[in-house]
Amino acid sequence: MQGRSISRGIGTGELLVSSEPISFLSGVDPETGIVVEHGHPLEGQSIAGRVLAFPYGKGSTVGSYVIYALKQNGLAPAAIINTETEPIIAVGAIIAEIPMIDRLPPEFSDLPPGTTVTVNGDTGEVSCDGTS
């Protein structure tokens, strides 16, 4: 599936999907990689090493630094997919060198959580089971 490239690189992992936006500042613990935002659909789940898909980011610009801290702590997602990327998440992905894309076709939402996918931030493509 073809999307728009935001941050270069290639990452593969299990798809972790949220229907709700994510705030990295106070929403994700950079020391554990666990979503800690009370009431969030992913509360209690680890984002480490997974392909994290969510509509868009929310919250403070410090969220970019939290994404960078997750990377430094070895707890960052393997890649990020947004419906529509906004600057806070884009900057975090770029400085942390996490592959990131957005604007995928509607059929992306048919992929079930847990599917192993590869995000190619160089080309803007996402593939699963050897397809793109």
Image (tube, grey):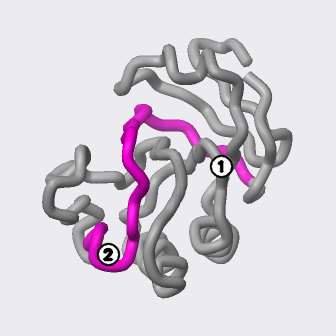
The segment highlighted magenta reads: 9-30
Residue 23 x %, y %: 39, 68
Q: Is 67 left, or right, of 131 in this rendering?
A: left
Q: Label 2 belongs to which residue?
A: 30
* Nearer to us in this view, 115 or 40: 40
Kindly identify the amino acid type of the residue bearing the numbered disc 2: Pro
Residue at 36% across, 54% down: 48
Kindly identify the amino acid type of the residue bearing the numbered disc 1: Glu
Q: CA distance from mark 2 to mark 1?
A: 23 Å
Nearer the N terminus, badge 2 or badge 1? 2
| Helix, strand or loop status at disc 1 | loop
Residue at 42% across, 44% down: 50
Q: Magenta stretch: dominant SS?
A: loop
Residue 77 x %, y %: 45, 54
Q: Label 1 belongs to which residue?
A: 84
User: Measured along the vertical axis of the image, is residue 87 above or below residue 47?
Assistant: below
Magenta region includes residue 28: yes
Q: Nearer the viewer, mark 2 or mark 1?
A: 1
Q: Is 49 left, or right, of 6 in this rendering?
A: left
Label of residue 63 in the image: none
Mark 2 residue crowding within 10 angstroms, few (<14) / some (14–19) / many (20+): many
